[in-house]
Image (spheres, grey):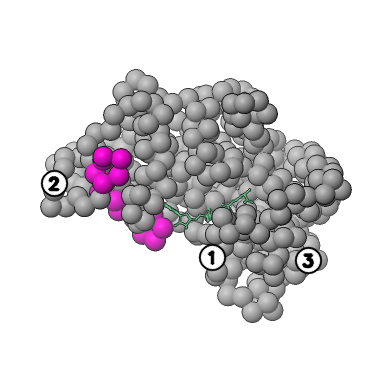
């Protein structure tokens, strides 16, 4: 699953973009229960978990496990009694880069592989409902599922189904990300938001979301500076991330087309033409230093594929029977679902996220 950047400025809870520089991978294998080695139980299932950092969270807190359990419950399918679950993630956690969304989508995707084997896979639409319900909003999970740039929304009727559609993205920008070395938890950043906003601020954002969608599709970089402005969440989150305004200004002054808070923060995302990326990176690095914040600045392609899942076929010649290690290069990966392209019509639109050629 790719990392993601949600909101893109004005698109609070509705716009998201995949960032393929980082990824979270998960492997799920049913196993025999050995009572000496299996300590954790969740949903009457025993879990043998391997991962580092947040991925090593105990099953009852682990988002990958919670998503697997949610998928099996939704399908009405009994679990095998015990699972081995290995998780590897390069996504910086709690930085506004969608680590929790990737964990949720990974859990759903590995569970769905087994449900597919049992003849009752969840549809892409069901996966989106589960993912957005677990995450609480759909923008970053939709981008992790579909890849590219997406727009997510919720139907207004009683069922309140989550929906998502891929957007056009002109192949013209790199992302430059300033990633402070401090954690920013999404639930805290959401707690900083007011319960209501003014009509004027709502109208300000509505216009900018429309402008942003049009500018991304047409490769109109000159529109992004205004199109990525926001009045619904960034002004309130500046109290948590006081460097935000300075970093945005520095990125724009150095030639970024647009800049905003990445997800719920603390990272800052700038969309930049490739020839200006190094200058913008230097400006963001000096901005972090001037604000007295440790951190790093990273260049990253934008868009790219979403969730990929499949079977890992172990090469008998290379692996002794009972070998429990996570898959490695010696194993074959047989993809069964890529960017959920096969079922995208269920979400909206006929094909995976599209990237057009150079403008
Ligand atoms: N398997 C997991 N992988 C990654 N993060 C997890 C996992 N399980 C739970 N989490 C939690 O997700 C939280 C980070 O999510 P969040 O605050 O939404 O930030 P972000 O998604 O921007 O990285 C951390 O508190 C982390 O412990
Ligand atoms: N729309 C959400 C996005 C949170 O993204 P994350 O990657 O920071 O979890 C919000 O702004 O709260």
Q: CA distance from mark 2 to mark 1?
A: 37 Å
The one nearer the camera, 318 or 258, is: 258
Residue at the disc numbered 2: 34
Residue at the disc numbered 3: 249
Which residues are the magenta region? 41-55
Q: Quadrant of residue 310?
A: top left
Badge nearest the viewer, 2 or 3: 2
Residue at the image point whose x is 45% and y is 30% from the top: 337
Is residue 121 within the magenta segment? no
Horizontal placement of 135 versus 255: left or right? left
Callout 1: CB less than 8 Å from ligand 1: yes
Where's residue 9, x and y in %? 72, 51
Residue at the disc numbered 1: 183
Neighbour tally class for label 2: few under 14, some 14-19, many 20 plus, Cα within 10 Å: few
Badge nearest the viewer, 3 or 1: 1
Residue at the image point whose x is 54% and y is 51% from the top: 98
331 over 50 or under it: above or below: above
Q: CA distance from mark 2 to mark 3?
A: 57 Å
Tags 2 and 1 touching, CB below 8 Å: no
277 over 124 or under it: above or below: below
Tags 3 and 1 touching, CB below 8 Å: no
Locate the C terminus and report the quarter of the image it occupies.
top right
The one nearer the camera, 219 or 117, is: 117
Q: What secondary structure is found at the residue carrying circle 2?
A: loop
The one nearer the camera, 341 or 245, is: 245
Q: What secondary structure is found at the residue carrying circle 3?
A: helix
- Of mark 3 and mark 1, the one earlier in the sequence is 1
Where's residue 29, x and y in %? 27, 39
Q: Residue furthest top?
A: 119
Residue 238 visible somewhere in the drawing: yes
Q: What secondary structure is found at the residue carrying circle 1?
A: loop
Horizontal placement of 254 versus 85: left or right? right
């Amino acid at each position: 699953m790719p990392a993601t950047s949600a909101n893109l400025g004005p698109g609070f809870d509705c716009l998201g973009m995949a960032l393929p520089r980082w990824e979270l991978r998960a492997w799920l294998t049913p196993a025999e229960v050995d009572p000496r080695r299996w300590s954790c139980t969740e949903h009457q299932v025993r879990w043998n978990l391997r991962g580092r950092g947040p991925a090593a969270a105990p099953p009852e807190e682990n988002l990958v496990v919670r998503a697997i359990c949610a998928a099996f419950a939704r399908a009405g399918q009994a679990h095998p009694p015990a699972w081995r679950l290995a998780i590897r993630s390069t996504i910086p956690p709690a930085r506004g880069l969608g680590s929790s969304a990737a964990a949720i989508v990974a859990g759903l995707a590995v569970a769905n592989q087994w449900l597919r084997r049992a003849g009752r896979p969840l549809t892409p639409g069901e996966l989106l409902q589960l993912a957005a319900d677990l995450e609480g909003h759909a923008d970053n999970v939709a981008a992790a599922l579909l890849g590219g740039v997406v727009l997510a929304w919720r139907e207004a009727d009683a069922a309140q189904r989550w929906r998502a559609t891929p957007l056009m993205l002109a192949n013209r920008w790199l992302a430059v990300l300033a990633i402070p070395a401090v954690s920013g938890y999404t639930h805290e950043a959401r707690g900083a938001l007011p319960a209501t906003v003014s009509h004027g601020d709502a109208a300000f954002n509505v216009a900018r979301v429309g402008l942003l969608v049009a500018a991304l599709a047409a490769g109109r970089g000159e529109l992004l500076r205004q199109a990525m402005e926001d009045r619904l969440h960034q002004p309130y989150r500046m109290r948590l991330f006081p460097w935000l305004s300075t970093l945005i200004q520095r990125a724009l002054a150095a030639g970024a087309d647009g800049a905003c808070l990445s997800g719920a923060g603390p990272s800052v995302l700038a969309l930049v033409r490739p020839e200006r990326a190094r200058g913008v990176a230097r400006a963001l690095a000096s901005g972090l230093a001037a604000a007295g914040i440790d951190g790093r600045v990273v260049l990253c392609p934008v868009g790219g594929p979403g969730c990929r899942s499949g079977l890992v076929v172990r090469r008998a010649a290379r692996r002794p029977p009972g070998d429990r290690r996570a898959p490695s290069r010696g194993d074959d990966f047989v993809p069964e679902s890529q960017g959920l392209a096969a079922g995208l019509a269920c979400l909206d639109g006929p094909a995976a996220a599209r990237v057009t050629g150079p403008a």
